[in-house]
């Protein structure tokens, strides 16, 4: 059942899904390992401060919480209902939720349009739209919010906290990547699995995160397909001035398109069609899952790159060459260092160093040279942003360089320019890199990924320029 338009009431009411005061788990189970048990357990263990109401007509208590035979038997208001009952009885449960005046619904249960049961799916959507209740799903993992300490899902834990809202058509990716966010310090504000997107689609979620959620600075999307392309483009264009949107579109190959149909029942579509739509929608594309997180991390932590002069500062010539190649690939080809800046940079390198872009401080570079060079570059009026590359040497400890970059990050904030790090080395370098992310500086293990991230910041800068030019022409 296609969404005919973007519904403002849905955007308003989504807050009761992501920041509920009370949650009913309908289909809660006493049996560990069952989804109905794990959702209740996750709500408790995530530290959710609201009320939790397990619903199961055959149980009196689950995990120390009083159980209710029906959602209608709960004496208080219910903001969010999480449904995990078998597919044949979901419709009746939805009707009960509607009569209870539940504010929002998440249907974890599968067995609907993704396996051909479109009629049953349309029937539950019809009830929700009649009562103006936003429904996420069916066929989802659930929703997670760091702001409200809400893990209303069967994912193992809340993700590492941050400013990225992740919207995913794949629930398994969410489950698998929760631990990855902690390992690599990629911070998420909210995670929502949308599955079949029978009611709430990408468009309304994008607008909620852009317009109603101060905890989110960037929206990252894993997309297999959409049947509401016009609404998607409209939502992204409306949201882009406030919040960057980065999308990984999957299912472009012939086999990938078939897999998409069997997974979520979505039409995958061609790369050319989606690419054109994304450009029109002011969307930044990612080439793979790693790139989605890399670009979203930078967009969530740093300001846009507002001109094309990116200065690369490195202690290794080879890393600088790789960064130069990558810069061209990602639409930010390196330009010459301004002559007056080049002259000042000589104070932070030996005579055999290079002030050309990339700036090579050589392997002799210590934290003092790094700091001086970074600050000179950031303060120069023609420089738009800086990428700092560090190759682990015996001259300097990785954490000392990380702290130097973070200190320079304060200057970057003052001048409102992006600063990105590339830290190349082993375990001790990774530790320093993760520490940098905790300080708000995106850090990557290879030059290609760092330059892709800076390229995304330039793409967003160009998007803002287009929006500004369009407004001025009106």
Image (cartoon, rainbow, N blue to C red):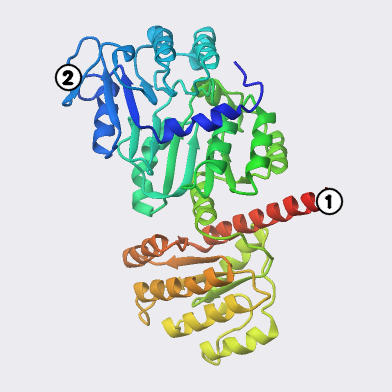
How many residues crowd mark 2 within 10 Å: few (<14), some (14–19), many (20+)?
some
Which residue lies at the image location 25% right of the left edge and 15% below the top edge?
A: 68
- Compared to residue 205, the image places residue 368 above or below, namely below
Which residue lies at the image location 24% right of the left edge and 10% below the top edge?
A: 57
For mark 2, give the secondary structure: strand
**Is residue 319 in view?**
no
The quarter in which the N terminus is drawn is top right
- Compared to residue 6, the image places residue 343 above or below, namely below
* 96 on left or right of 457: left
Which residue lies at the image location 64% right of the left edge and 58% below the top edge?
A: 458
* 3 on left or right of 65: right
Q: Quadrant of residue 147?
A: top left
For residue 473, the mark is 1
For mark 1, give the secondary structure: helix
How many residues crowd mark 1 within 10 Å: few (<14), some (14–19), many (20+)?
few
Of mark 1 and mark 2, the one earlier in the sequence is 2
Total of numbered circles in the picture?
2
Q: Quadrant of residue 401?
A: bottom left
Q: Position of residue 283 (x, y in %)?
A: 64, 44
What is the spatial separation of the Cα atoms under label 1 and label 2, in whole angstroms?
63 Å
**Which residue is tagged 2?**
61
Furthest residue in direction front, as rendered: 76
Q: Position of residue 239 (x, y in %)?
A: 62, 43
Q: Position of residue 460 (x, y in %)?
A: 64, 54
């Amino acid at each position: 059942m296609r969404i005919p338009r973007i519904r403002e009431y849905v955007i308003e009411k989504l807050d009761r899904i992501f920041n509920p005061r009370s949650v009913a788990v309908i289909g809660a189970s006493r049996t560990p390992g069952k989804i109905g048990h794990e959702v209740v357990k996750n709500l408790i263990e995530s530290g959710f401060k609201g009320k939790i109401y397990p619903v199961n007509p055959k149980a009196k208590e689950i995990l120390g919480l009083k159980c209710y035979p029906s959602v209608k038997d709960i004496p208080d208001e219910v903001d969010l209902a999480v449904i995990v009952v078998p597919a044949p009885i979901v419709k009746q449960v939805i009707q009960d939720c509607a009569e209870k005046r539940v504010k929002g619904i998440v249907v974890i249960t599968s067995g609907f349009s993704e396996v051909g049961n479109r009629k049953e799916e349309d029937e539950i959507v019809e009830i929700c739209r009649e009562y103006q209740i936003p429904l996420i799903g069916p066929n989802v993992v659930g929703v997670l919010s760091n702001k409200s300490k809400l893990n209303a899902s069967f994912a193992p834990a809340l993700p590492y906290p941050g400013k990225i809202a992740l919207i995913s058509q794949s629930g398994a990716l969410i489950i698998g990547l929760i631990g990855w966010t902690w390992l690599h310090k990629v911070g998420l504000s909210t995670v929502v699995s949308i599955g079949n997107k029978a009611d709430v689609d990408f468009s309304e979620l994008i607008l909620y995160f852009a317009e109603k959620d101060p905890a989110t600075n960037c929206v990252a999307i894993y997309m297999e397909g959409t049947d509401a392309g016009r609404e998607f483009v409209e939502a992204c264009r409306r949201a882009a001035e406030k919040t960057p949107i980065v999308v990984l579109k999957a299912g472009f190959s012939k086999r990938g398109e078939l897999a998409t149909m069997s997974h979520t029942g979505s039409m995958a579509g061609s790369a050319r069609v989606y690419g054109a739509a994304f450009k029109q929608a002011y969307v930044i594309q990612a080439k793979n899952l790693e790139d989605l997180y890399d670009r979203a991390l930078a967009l969530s932590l740093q300001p846009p790159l507002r001109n094309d002069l990116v200065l690369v500062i490195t202690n290794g010539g080879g890393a600088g060459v790789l960064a130069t190649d990558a810069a061209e690939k990602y639409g930010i080809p390196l330009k010459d260092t301004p002559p007056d800046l080049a002259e000042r940079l000589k104070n932070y390198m030996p005579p055999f160093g290079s002030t050309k872009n990339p700036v090579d401080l050589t392997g002799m570079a210590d934290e003092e040279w790094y700091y001086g060079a970074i600050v000179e570059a950031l303060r120069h009026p023609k420089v738009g942003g800086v990428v700092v590359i560090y190759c682990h040497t015996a001259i300097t400890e990785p954490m000392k360089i990380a702290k130097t970059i973070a200190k320079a990050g304060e200057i970057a904030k003052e001048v409102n320019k992006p600063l990105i790090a590339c830290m190349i080395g082993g375990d001790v370098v990774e530790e320093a890199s993760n520490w940098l992310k905790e300080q708000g500086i995106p850090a990557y293990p290879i030059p290609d990924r760092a330059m892709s991230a800076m390229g995304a910041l330039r793409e967003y800068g160009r998007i803002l320029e287009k929006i500004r030019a369009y407004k001025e022409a009106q």
